[in-house]
Amino acid sequence: MNDALVKKDLTHGAWIAYDAQFLAPDEADAALAALLEELAWEQRANVVFGKEVVQPRLSAWAGAIPYRFSGQTLEPRAPSPTLAALSERVVDAVGHAFNHVVINRYRDGSDWIARHADNERELGYRPLIAALSLGATRRFELYRKKGRRTERKRLTHGSLLVMGGSCQHTWRHALPKDPACTDERLNLTWRTLHGPPGWSRDPSDDPNRRERDDTPGSAEDS
Ligand SMILES: O=C(O)CCC(=O)C(=O)O
């Protein structure tokens, strides 16, 4: 990871790293305008207990492998030119071979994403997730799965946040509504899919259970 990404340890081997100025303001402005224009935006639905629930945001994506989460599948899609260029920069900065990106478009503060973890088996053990924010500043929250520990971060235009270690197994994250926010925001999250939906290196091994049971905590962890 490059030095501009400042790392902070959470609990139980989870960490985040943040670079507020990953893109210069003019680069971030240009990327935002280009992505709004280039991408094919959809309002998709999750399937929860057999019922379709329309997502409170728009989305787009790119990757050569289908990605299934929340009861829906994102079929393979080629990246737009701006997305391809941003992917190269993120791969370089983080030093990790990401191969899939999901873009969430929050039209204003009434769009949001609920608490969840990016922990599908095909993301493997301790996945790295890199998230670029463009547009309005919004409050991002992380919550320890057990206990009450919370971490809040204001994600600004052009910033890059990386989540790593056990973060997707021992913590959840969300972008809550913000009634005061009237502007649009894009968030691009890069991941590495090791295989198609349901892939696992060892089908008897559930990384989420392994982390819950085995991850040592320090005296300050809750
Ligand atoms: O918009 C954000 O900052 C969070 C997005 C997110 O959690 C996700 O795409 O999994």
Image (tube, rainbow, N blue to C red):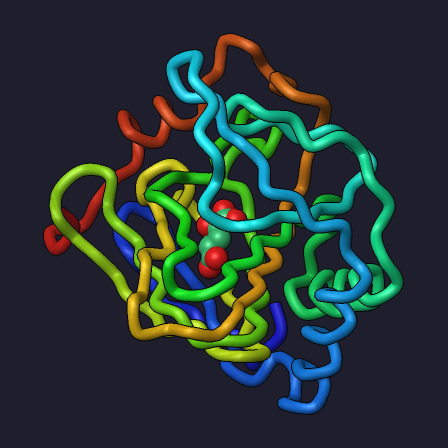
User: In the image, what residue occupies the spot 78% across and 61% down?
Assistant: 83
Q: Looking at this view, is 117 or 214 the one in front?
A: 117
Image location (x, y in percent) of residue 72? 59, 25
- Viewer-proximal residue among 139 and 202: 139
From the viewer's perspective, tell me whether residue 28 is left or right of residue 209. right
Indicate whether 59 appears above or below 32.
Answer: above
Q: Nearer the viewer, residue 39 or 2?
A: 39
Residue 171 point in image, percent of width and height = 32, 44
Establish if 144 lies above or below 38.
above
Q: On the rendered structure, is 47 left or right of 25?
A: left
Q: Residue at x 35, y 44 (%)?
A: 114
- Asked whether, in this view, residue 83 is left or right of residue 199, the answer is right
Residue drawn 41% across and 39% down? 117
Question: From this viewpoint, is residue 163 visible?
Answer: no
Q: Position of residue 89 (x, y in %)?
A: 75, 69
**What residue appears at the point 58 percent right and 14 percent down from the top-left corner?**
202
Residue 183 in sight here: yes
> Vertically, is 104 above or below 5?
above
Count numbered badges in the picture: 0
Quadrant (top left, top right, bottom left, bottom right) of the N terminus: bottom right
Residue 4 pos. (x, y %): 56, 81
